[in-house]
Image (tube, grey):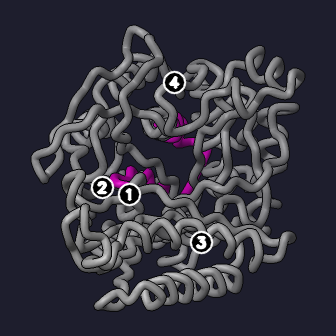
Amino acid sequence: MSLTPAHLLANAKTDLSFQRALYEDLHEHPELSGLERATSQKILGRLENLDCEIVQPIGGFGIVAVFRNGPGPTALFRADFDALPVKETTGVPYASTRVQARPDGSTVPVMHACGHDMHTTALLGACELLDDNRDSWSGTFLALFQPSEEIGTGADAMLADGLARRIPAPDVCFGQHIMPGRAGEVQTMPGGQLAAADSVTITITGRSAHGSMPHKAIDPTYVAAMVIIRLQGLVGREVDPNDFAVISVGKVHAGTTNNIIPDTAELTLNCRFYDDTVKRRVYSGIRRVVHAECEASGCPEPPRFEYFSHAELTDNSKEVFERVRPVFDAVFGPDSVDAERSTVSEDFSHIPRAFGAPYLFWLVGCTPREQWDAAVHGGTVDTDVPVNHMSTFLPDYEPTVSSATRAAAAAVLTYLGNHN
């Protein structure tokens, strides 16, 4: 039977009623990056009812479901499933009250404050749709469930654990993320969709002394304060206003008590860019500024730099966008809209880069439409609309899960559908 993705999705009889209970269960029982054991078991529980080969574990708790359905191309779709150390304040009946222990013994509240529970629910729904409508497509569908996206290590861990030799090589890769916007709108664009990012820990070494004797010390806290101020000058005075760069100081740590000048201070930065030339220039500037401030204060050792939580630029393939966008237009009508580039970052693109495959990553709006429209009309989007990583972040379930599920299936069917 030859059906377009739009016709298939409009007429599919697949029962997706499981999604609501699954989503609420995932939301109520989140797990931190690297500790997603129970979440992975819930995913496996759904996949075991489907006609697929399950490859796991990969890179910790990573899972790939391989749906083989005769000759044809191979399409991969990725969803992440880790949560954040955030205390939820949404007040919904299925809100998380979980506190989870970290490997170092500390405990933190945990919440799905970024929507990964929705990503997982949508991809499992797409798996059901593809498995239930095998007469409408041909080829191989790879459903990849990735842990540890929030700390920027999950995709690389799966690749390091042999992902490329354990699954068929994809011809195209897809991913999506829910974001503030009119719930159910599917937002696509070619080119740079999400920024490249790195985190950097800088350790400044001084000389400790009693708080009453600052002249006996070399105060690393003072050096750190000067560095923080000067870092903003790199963006404000050394980056072309037509370009983009962000340097955020997310963590500052120095000392253990009130009356001792510490011997070290530590800064952790988060840096984001759309252009590698700008990134190289800014990183060179960061090192220059930090070394100069340490030398100016007479620090006994040079500063130390540790780079981590790396994410490449999410740079959508023009040819994939031009093929998928008309399908989204047919499926979603006026809810298929142009995306704007976002300053957030993702490690999704590490996977297609490793395979040399083109890819498309898009956004799905999740804010109740009345709330979004009122905020846009009133000019209060920045203050009245909860965003990812906030304790009040919660998608409008029905339109968001419907669009995210259908978008995942539609993109895959664009390449595997029998209409080709």
Along the line of sight, the residue nearer the viewer: 250 or 189: 250
Q: What's the CA distance linking mark 2 and mark 4?
A: 28 Å
Residue 321 placement: quadrant: bottom right
Residue at image mark 3: 231
* Of pointers 2 and 3, the one earlier in the residue sequence: 2
Mark carried by residue 23: none
* Of pointers 3 and 1, the one earlier in the residue sequence: 1
Residue at image mark 1: 151
Q: What's the CA distance linking mark 2 and mark 3?
A: 37 Å
Along the line of sight, the residue nearer the viewer: 406 or 138: 406
Secondary structure beneath dot 1 equals loop
* Of pointers 3 and 4, the one earlier in the residue sequence: 3
User: Is-magenta flag for residue 327?
Assistant: no
| Label 2 environment density (alpha carbons within 10 Å; few <14, some 14–19, many ≥20) | many
* Of pointers 1 and 4, the one earlier in the residue sequence: 1
* Of pointers 2 and 4, the one earlier in the residue sequence: 2
Secondary structure beneath dot 3 equals helix
- In the rendered image, the quadrant that contains the N terminus is top right
Along the line of sight, the residue nearer the viewer: 107 or 60: 107
Residue at image mark 4: 392
User: Is-magenta flag for residue 131?
Assistant: yes
Name the residue type under label 4.
Thr
Front of the two marks 2 and 1:
1
Q: Position of residue 399 (x, y in %)?
A: 65, 22
265 on left or right of 245: left
What is the span of residues highlighted in magenta in the rendered image? Answer: 126-148
Q: What's the CA distance linking mark 3 and mark 4?
A: 31 Å
